[in-house]
Image (spheres, grey):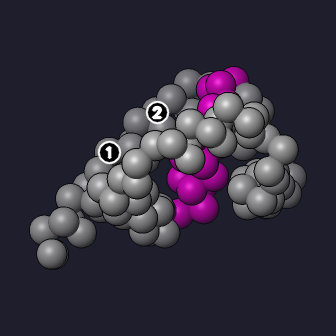
Amino acid sequence: MYRVAINTALVFHKNDKKRLDNHTLSDHDARAKAPYDDKYERQLKQFYGAVKYLNEVEKALILLYIEGLSGEDIAATLGISANNVRVKTNRTKTKLQNIIEAQNNEL
C-alpha cells in the first residue's frame, strides 16, 4: 500500500506539470511579462539535481511538501504519523542543503 501511494504521488506530480488547465490566464501573463531569471533556473536545476540523491521516502516527502500538502495529508499518503512527517521533513531539508553545498564546493 505504501508503494502504491508513493507511485501515485510521483505520477500525479509528473502529470501535473503537463496539465495546462492548472494555471489561470493572469498567471500566464505574469510569467510572460517577468524577465528571464537565469539564477532561478540554475537554482531549480541544482535543487532537482540534489533530489536525485535522496531515498524514495525522502523524495516523496519533499515533493508532496512542495505541492503544498499539509503535514496531515502527507502523513496519510505515506502512512506515517504527522509528527514523523515534521521530523523527516526537517531532516530531508538539512540533507538537501548539505548536498547542494557539497555540489557548490565541487565547482
Q: Which residues are magenta?
A: 54-72
Judge left or right: residue 19 versus residue 72: right
Quarter of the picture holding the C terminus: bottom left
Judge left or right: residue 70 versus residue 79: left
Which residue lies under the disc numbered 1? 94
Residue 49: assigned label:
none
Q: Is residue 6 visible?
A: no
Q: Amino acid at mark 1?
A: Thr
Which residue lies under the disc numbered 2? 87
Q: Residue 45: image x %, image y %?
A: 42, 64
Q: Nearer the viewer, residue 91 or 10?
A: 10
Provide the secondary structure element on which disc 2 rests. Answer: helix
Q: Amino acid at mark 2?
A: Val
Q: Is residue 58 magenta?
A: yes
**Who's the residue at 32% across and 45% down the image?**
94
Q: Is residue 97 visible?
A: yes
Q: Residue 58: image x %, image y %?
A: 54, 53
Q: Is residue 15 above or below residue 28?
A: below
**Who's the residue at 81% across and 53% down the image?**
19
Q: Residue 61: image x %, image y %?
A: 59, 45
| Dot in front, 1 or 2 | 1
**Who's the residue at 39% across and 44% down the image?**
93
Q: Quadrant of residue 38?
A: bottom left
Count neighbours of disc 1 (C-alpha within 10 A) and say few if under 14, some if 14 to 19, many if 20 or more: few
Mark 1 or mark 2, earlier in chain: 2
**Who's the residue at 40% across and 54% down the image?**
36
Q: Is residue 71 magenta?
A: yes
Query: How far apart are the two marked residues, 1 and 2, measured between alpha carbons?
Result: 11 Å
Q: Quadrant of residue 83?
A: top right
Count neighbours of disc 2 (C-alpha within 10 A) and say few if under 14, some if 14 to 19, many if 20 or more: few
Provide the secondary structure element on which disc 1 rests. Answer: helix
Q: Nearer the viewer, residue 17 or 90?
A: 17
